[in-house]
Image (spheres, rainbow, N blue to C red):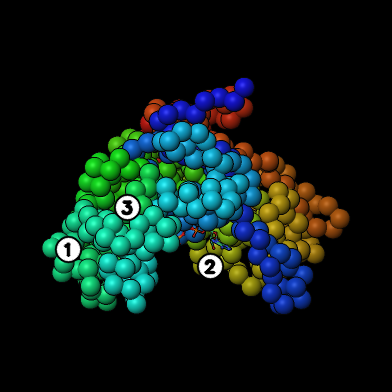
Amino acid sequence: MPTKPDPGLVAEARDLSVHFQLQGGALSRLLGIGARRVKAVDGVDVQLRRGEVLGVVGESGSGKTTLGRALLGLAPATGGTLTYHPTSGGTQEITRLKGAELRRLRTDVQMVFQDPSAALNPSMTIEEGVGHPLVIHGIASGEDLHRRVVAALERVGLAPVERFLSKYPSDLSGGQKQRAVIARAIILEPEVLVADEPVSMLDMSVRAKILQLMLDLKNDLGLTYLYITHDLASAKYFCDRVAIMYLGRIVEIGPTKEIFAHPRHPYTQALLKAIPEPDPDRMVPRDLPRGEIPDAAEPPLGCSFHPRCPVATPVCGWEQRDLKALLEEHWVRDETADYEAERATVGDLNGLDRPRTTARLAGKDPAAVRAVLDRVRAADPEEPLWGGVRAVEERHGHLEVDFVDGVDPPLRASHGVEVACVHYGADPEWPAEPGEPGEPGEPGS
Ligand SMILES: Nc1ncnc2c1ncn2[C@@H]1O[C@H](COP(=O)(O)OP(=O)(O)OP(=O)(O)O)[C@@H](O)[C@H]1O
């Protein structure tokens, strides 16, 4: 028997994936690189509760916008389910909606974008633009339409309304434009607003005012928000709960207060160290050993954060691409290393570009390659990758490095939040690592 949906739930993703198939260009085909799949959202479980502001926070490319677009039925799911529970009752599987049902969803779930100038049609007056959704959905016309537009503009603080009705978007300031965009979003009386960086293009002076307006509207109109941002400071102010995304996954989720007071996941800890930034639009996590966010088409094995993680363990998913990165870093960082000679001994590293737990080094003299690896290890014995090495053996005339199979940790409850990290959780197969599993604030805080 199907279970009745929880009345407190507005939407729920279960193991939701949105993968994009990228067709390689002519050059890729020539080089034998086939079609690639970008795992924009990759096995996400999340619930949106009625009346809450759920923040989705992460670096550029972590999949925040794709998750929001999926909720609007704009990004097609390639796996899992995404259900919507309207207040009118019932359950809709968003990923399967078509025709009239999809149009209905588009009235119930509205989006506010980052750039208000791009969101408003420049050739429409504010009255036409804000009332447009009512016209295209055939909901209102004539005097009724005018009355509703006036009410929406008043609600968002564009008053006296007469001053704005016949203006064009280009006549308005950035903050006023975003107010008009919000008026257009609420005019269909939606249940959910997906707000994708709604204030990041606005002057600092108006950001707080727009967020406050959105909070007032939420309370007055009983809205639910999915707030997408890379700005943790605004998430702290605005959100009831926060989900931290990394490479298509939620790595930590919980009440905003708890996440900010006791960040568990090493990625969350690094993000929190990144505020305040001189430029709040840039979010650069601090204290990470390696900077770049990896390719979402071929994410790291095991925990996809492991290559950048300052507290990675032997089971976090080490693989040959990590060894390549380590060798290259060693040659850049360690001035005593004889770069040219070592590189020639180890051989071409391009064979290590795929996600594999066995690295076959190209060098023709396995004993000499082993000596180079020993030197690299001696230069930084604390490097966590070495803990993940299971065997270093000569096979078929080459030195091969085998890594232990990594753990891809699921989200697990830990002191009021859920966190996906081997340092937290109760699986007895996971080794005890620095700090007791489940201790708030560990590791590294
Ligand atoms: N339509 C698409 N086709 C192919 N790849 C896509 C598409 N949309 C998003 N992606 C890819 O999916 C990944 C996640 O993108 P997404 O825009 O959801 O991330 P984001 O966290 O919102 O980033 P940003 O803050 O830069 O908007 C990225 O690697 C992106 O290039």
**SS at mark 3?**
helix
The Cα atoms of the two marked residues, 2 and 1, are separated by 62 Å
Q: Amino acid at mark 2?
A: Val
Quadrant containing the C terminus is top left
Kind of residue at disc 3: Ile
Q: Position of residue 16 (x, y in %)?
A: 57, 44
Mark number, residue 186: 3
Does residue 84 appear in this view? yes
Under mark 1, the amino acid is Val
Outermost top residue: 1
Q: Which residue is mark 1?
A: 161
Mark 3 sits near ligand 1, with its Cβ under 8 Å away: no
Q: Secondary structure at mark 1?
A: loop
Residue lying at 74% horizontally and 65% vertically, measured from the top left: 34
Q: Identify the mark at residue 332; answer none if there is no mark.
A: 2
Q: Would you identify the image quadrant in which residue 138 lies? A: bottom left
| Mark closer to the chain start, 2 or 3 | 3
Cα–Cα gap, marks 3 and 1: 16 Å
Work out which quarter of the rendered image holds the N terminus and state it: top right
| Relative to 194, residue 35 above or below | below
Residue 131 as seen in the image, left or right of residue 289: left
Say which of marks 2 and 3 sits in front: 3
- Residue at 24% across, 57% down: 147
- Residue 32 location, x and y as percent? 77, 70
Identify the residue shown where x is 34% and y is 48%.
189
